[in-house]
Structures are given as C-alpha cells and as structure tokens.
Image (spheres, helix red, strand yellow):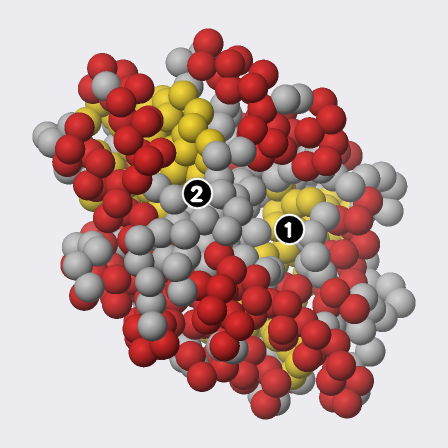
C-alpha cells in the first residue's frame, strides 16, 4: 500500500481524510513497514466502510489487516441505530464467531516432549478436522435449537465442560438475543454432525510452550509462566455460520435499495439495525455465535479426554475464549454522552481494559486476555486489553496473510512444510497436505511485528509469546 495519501502523528495510526461519500475518516493501525506490505484493497475496503450509514467515529483496520469480503479482515466499525446505523454481514464474515481459546495445563513443555508423538497422534484421532468433517454428535432439530440458544452453557449442561469454563468465555458462554427461528433449515442441516469439529483453512488445535514473558504481573494473573505447556483451539461456527452469511448477504443485497442505502460495494450489503432484515440477521448471527462457543467447548472436552488418557496429571483450565468475527451491542461515550452502538469486528478481537464491567471478577484488575494466533511454525501471543481502548476496545486477531492460498500452494508442498517443522521439533497432523501448504508459516506476516505494532498503537499490551509443539490442522 502506498502511504502518500495517509497522515500520521506518531507512526502507529495512519489516517485517510474523508472524501467523496466517506462519512468518517479511515484509520489503519501499524508501522510503516506493515502498511507498505498491505494490499491496496485494504485501503479501498476501509474507505468503503466509512461510507456506510450511521457509522461512528472512524472506520478502522488492525495491524494484521488484509483483503477480505466486504470489510477488510482486521476491520472494525461501530454503528448507531438512532442515526440510521446498519448491520452488515460483510462486517462479520462467513465464519461467524471464529475465535480462539487457550487452556493452561498444569504441565511443562518438558512433560509434553516426553509423550509428544503419542499425544499428537491421539489428538489427531480424537479431533475431527478437515473440509466437511463430522463428529460423533448428531443433533436433531430440538437439540439444534437448544444449542443455538444456549451456546457453551448448553454444552456444559450436556456434560461437555466445566462450570468455571463459562466465566472465562466472552458473554459467559452464551450471547443474549439469539433467535434460532431465523436460522434456516439448510444451515441447521449443515451443522447436524459438525459439532466438536475443527473444520479446515487456518483452524487448528495446538499444544504450545510459553516462551518469552513480557509482563510478569499479568502473566501471573493469567496463570502462565515460562516453560509452561498450554493448549490453543482456533475454530468457529462451521457450515452453519457460512450458510447464515450466504443467505443474509443475498437478502440484504436485494433489499438495501429499499432502505435508501447506496452500497459502495455489493459485498457490504447491509440493512438498518432497527429494520426487520437487520433484526433477523442479528438474531441469526447471535445464534451463530452460540454455535461457535458450543463448538469450541466440545473440542475442549475432547482435548481433556486425551490428556486424561496420556498425561493424567494434567489439569486443563480455560484461560479465556475470544471471538473475532462478530457484531456486538456495546455502550461507549461518544461526543460526551453514552451511545448504544453495534460494533462489527471482522478478524478483530475485543480487548476490554482493566475495570471493564464485562470481565470476570478475577480479571478486572488486569484486563481481558487477547489471544493472537500464529501459523504452525510461528509464535502465538497472549496480550491484554488496555485502559484507553482504541477502536472501541479492539485489537488484531492474528498475523494476517501476506500471500494468498493459491500462491502458497505454488511455492510449497505440504510434505515439505511438515518435514521442515518436524526438524524444528514441531509435529503437524493434518488430513490435507494441500491445506498444510496453504497455511505455510511464511504465507503470513511477521506476527511478532504485528503484536508489537498493536502494543505501540495502544490497542493491547503484550504478555507472553507461545511456541508450537503439536499442531492439529484441518
């Protein structure tokens, strides 16, 4: 991306001044090198978002931003329903509530290395992964409705979790306002046998070693220390979320004009928050969030069964679960008064700072854990929300792609990646060698640079760096 039309005061946030149909500025976070490596489509998409009705403050892009569908991946924007604000499927994404949860294990990386191969093999056998993967759970329509309404709470009640998991999950494991009646038969059909599955793409289950600690006080509050072993699960709402996104995109694209909305891009199809279409999408989208929360909860249960079998001394406790493809109703002070806003985070993580009322009591003094994923051979990171809370208390969600999946497949083979990582002590298990090639570590930006930029911009503060030991890929 060329920087000539952007202005910056400190080199951490770059502003595009409103022009044409833009209602607010566009702001891209990151240092100059990260922005130069971004596709020009990021600039185009973040400015298109700034044209949507009812947008508040600015259209934002995180340091890991790259070209997405509608919003850039890493895009954040808030809309005020009292000013005609809209909800856009392109601001949430097809994989509704794709997110990350990290669990402490009570073990060290040395404990893992002693059983690394058997642990990797067993996790791979127990965790359904890949395109169209099915698990052992089959939901009838009644149970599907209960899951869509109950989220991780439903999963815990069914025996797939522990009560304390819910306190460390966004929205206590179940978002209010879900409306299962707005989820179509086709979306339900696609999800009937997909609960407790990873899926494909960049989703993974990873056993990791805690490496560098950046903030010892917060790390202690999170229960992590150098040399510890943790488990991170990254997945979303699978076929159900994709079907919801597809159906509502088509619907909103047809009805936008009837609301007087001129779309800068069809991929930004939207509807007023207070309209019937807007309310119906929000109800379906929230049901999709609950589906993803339940899915990660069941995967946590399956992971615990493997550790109980191979490393019975382990004690897997949830550090936190965060989503990064959502639209959530939140209150912020804007222009000197509190306003009810609908915050879209597309490939961006909520990052509440210390004292925020939504945090569990044992985290209020330090802030919300922010979990940033790497890619098989690269580090992941744990950050924490900061009090200033820029971009509506939002942060990045990963490294961000610098190369398309097609380009990655041309440059690497899956076997080449698996062998090179094994030589570094990282065991990969996957149903698809093509999928491994698509997710090659070098197909992504430098995650260390991304999280450093996020900290310098005041989005979130670094706490710990995590290094992969075992990675189960779709």
Who's the residue at 49% across and 16% down the image?
421
Q: Position of residue 452 (x, y in %)?
A: 54, 32
As helix, strand or loop, the secondary structure at mark 1 comes to strand
Q: Where is residue 29 in the image (x, y as percent from the top left)?
A: 65, 45
- Disc 1 crowd rating (10 Å Cα; few below 14, some 14-19, many 20+) is many
Q: Mark 2 points at which residue?
A: 129
Q: Where is 274 relative to 453, above or below? A: below
**Number of disc labels:** 2
- Farthest-out residue, left: 313
**Residue 73 tag number:** 1
Q: Where is 5 relative to 154, above or below? A: above
The reply to whether residue 202 is in sight is yes
Q: Where, by quadrant of the figure, is residue 106 drawn?
A: top left
The reply to whether residue 97 is in sight is no
Q: Where is 334 relative to 464, above or below? A: below
Left or right: 320, with 317 as reference point: right
Sequence order check: which comes first, mark 2 or mark 1? 1
Closer to the camera, 418 or 65? Answer: 418
- Disc 2 crowd rating (10 Å Cα; few below 14, some 14-19, many 20+) is many
Who's the residue at 61% across and 50% down the image?
74
Who's the residue at 81% across and 66% down the image?
265
Q: Nearer the viewer, mark 2 or mark 1?
A: 2
Task: State the separation of the CA atoms marked 2 and 1.
Answer: 23 Å
As helix, strand or loop, the secondary structure at mark 2 comes to loop
Closer to the camera, 343 or 268? Answer: 268
Who's the residue at 32% across and 78% down the image?
142
Closer to the camera, 390 or 288? Answer: 288
Left or right: 272, with 396 as reference point: right
Q: Where is residue 188 in the image (x, y as percent from the top left)?
A: 46, 71
Q: Where is 30 relative to 408, above or below? A: below
Q: Where, by quadrant of the figure, is residue 402 drawn?
A: top right
């Amino acid at each position: 991306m060329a920087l000539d039309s952007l202005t910056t005061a400190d080199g951490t946030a770059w502003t595009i001044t409103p022009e044409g149909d833009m209602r607010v500025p566009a702001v891209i976070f990151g240092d100059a090198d990260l922005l130069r490596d971004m596709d020009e489509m990021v600039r185009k998409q973040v400015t298109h978002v700034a044209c949507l009705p009812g947008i508040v403050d600015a259209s934002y892009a995180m340091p890991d931003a790259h070209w997405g569908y509608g919003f850039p991946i890493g895009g954040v924007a808030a809309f005020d329903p009292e000013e005609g604000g809209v909800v856009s499927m392109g601001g949430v994404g097809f994989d509704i509530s794709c997110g990350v949860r990290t669990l402490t294990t009570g073990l060290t990386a040395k404990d893992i290395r002693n059983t690394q191969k058997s642990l990797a093999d067993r996790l791979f056998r127990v965790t359904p992964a890949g395109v169209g993967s099915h698990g052992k759970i089959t939901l009838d329509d009644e149970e599907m409705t209960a899951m869509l309404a109950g989220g991780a709470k439903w999963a815990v009640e069914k025996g797939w979790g522990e009560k304390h998991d819910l306190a460390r999950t966004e929205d206590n494991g179940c978002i209010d306002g879900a409306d299962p009646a707005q989820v179509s038969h086709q979306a339900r059909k696609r999800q009937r046998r997909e609960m407790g599955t990873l899926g494909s793409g960049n989703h993974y289950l990873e056993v990791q070693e805690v490496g560098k600690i950046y903030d010892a006080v917060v790390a202690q509050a999170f229960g992590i220390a150098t040399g510890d072993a943790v488990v991170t699960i990254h997945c979303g709402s699978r076929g159900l979320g994709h079907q919801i996104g597809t159906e509502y995109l088509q619907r909103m694209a047809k009805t936008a004009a009837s609301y007087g909305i001129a779309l800068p891009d069809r991929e930004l199809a939207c509807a007023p928050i207070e309209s019937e279409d807007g309310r119906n999408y929000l109800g379906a989208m929230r049901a999709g969030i609950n589906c993803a929360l339940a899915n990660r909860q069941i995967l946590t249960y399956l992971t615990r069964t493997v550790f109980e079998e191979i490393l019975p001394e382990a004690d897997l406790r949830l550090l936190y679960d965060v989503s990064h493809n959502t639209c959530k109703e939140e209150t912020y002070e804007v222009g000197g008064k509190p306003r009810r806003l609908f915050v879209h985070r597309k490939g961006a993580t909520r990052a509440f700072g210390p004292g925020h009322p939504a945090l569990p009591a044992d985290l209020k003094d330090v802030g919300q854990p922010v979990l940033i994923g790497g890619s098989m051979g690269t580090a992941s990171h744990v950050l924490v929300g900061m009090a200033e809370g820029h971009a509506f208390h939002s942060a990045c969600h990963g490294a961000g792609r610098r190369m398309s999946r097609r380009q990655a497949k041309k440059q690497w083979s899956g076997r080449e990646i698996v062998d090179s990582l094994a030589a570094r002590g990282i065991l990969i298990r996957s149903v698809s060698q093509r999928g491994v090639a698509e997710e090659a570590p070098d197909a992504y930006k430098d995650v260390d640079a991304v999280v450093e930029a996020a900290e310098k911009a005041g989005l979130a503060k670094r706490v710990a760096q995590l290094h992969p030991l075992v990675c189960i890929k779709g």
